[in-house]
Image (cartoon, rainbow, N blue to C red):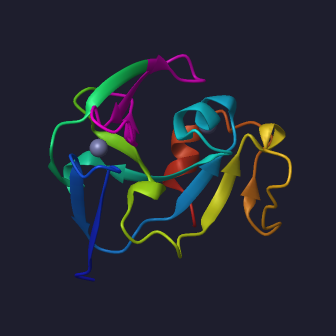
Amino acid sequence: MSETQTGGCQCGAVRYAFNGPVPPAYACHCGECKKQSASAFSMSIPFTYDGLTVTGTPKILETTAHSGKRKYNYFCGKCGTRLWHSGTNPPTAITLKVGTLDHSADITPVGHLWVSKKQTGIMLDPETDQHQTQPDDVVAWRSNLGQ
Ligand SMILES: [Zn+2]
Ligand SMILES: [Zn+2]
């Protein structure tokens, strides 16, 4: 596959590209994801930061993940769009925010976390992998998505 995917923030100050098909995506319905996405849930793709070609410099918000580990949330300092999260700074393994992709309309989440916190009226495909909270080893769960 030699297709190139592109994406970026709302204002265009931070842009990225990567080669190959889009990896499987998942959705999270937790309270933190409602805040960071300013919407009903977040959709993310587990990815490796080294695989991205980035232009522009995102800012970082540090938070504590559900696991208790440090989490670095990368966002555009101009328009505020959340771009990716990582457990490290500089980023290594990341979760890339699906809504930042230029062509994201046909990306279907294959798994759902924190369904117990799901927004009323959001209907999920019963065939997808659903968790009331999240697996103990959420990193392993993410790396096995779609398999
Ligand atoms: Zn921006
Ligand atoms: Zn979440």
Q: Identify the residue at horizontal 59%, vertical 31% (top origin).
A: 35
Q: Is residue 80 magenta?
A: yes
Residue 134 position in % (x across, y down):
69, 38
Note whether 126 is above or below 54 in the view shown: below
Tell me the residue at 31%/25% (across/down). Answer: 60
Q: Position of residue 17 (x, y in %)?
A: 22, 62
Ligand 1 quadrant in view: top left
Residue at the location (51% across, 64% down)? 24
Answer yes or no: is residue 146 visible: yes
Q: Quadrant of the C terminus?
A: bottom right
| Front position in the image: 15 or 127 | 15
Q: Position of residue 110 (x, y in %)?
A: 63, 64
Tell me if 37 is positioned left or right of 114 in this view.
left
Q: Give above or below for 22 relative to 47.
A: below
Asked if the stretch drawn in magenta spans residue 93, the answer is: no
> Residue 119 location in percent, x, y?
79, 44
Image position of 75 (left or right of 147) = left
Q: Nearer the viewer, residue 13 or 16?
A: 13
Q: Which residues are magenta?
A: 63-88
What residue is shown at x 29% (from left), y 49% (from top)? 11
Q: Is residue 34 above or below residue 143?
A: above
Position of residue 42 in the picture relative to residue 96 (left or right):
right
Q: Which quadrant holds the N terminus?
A: bottom left
Q: Residue 125's image quarter?
A: bottom right
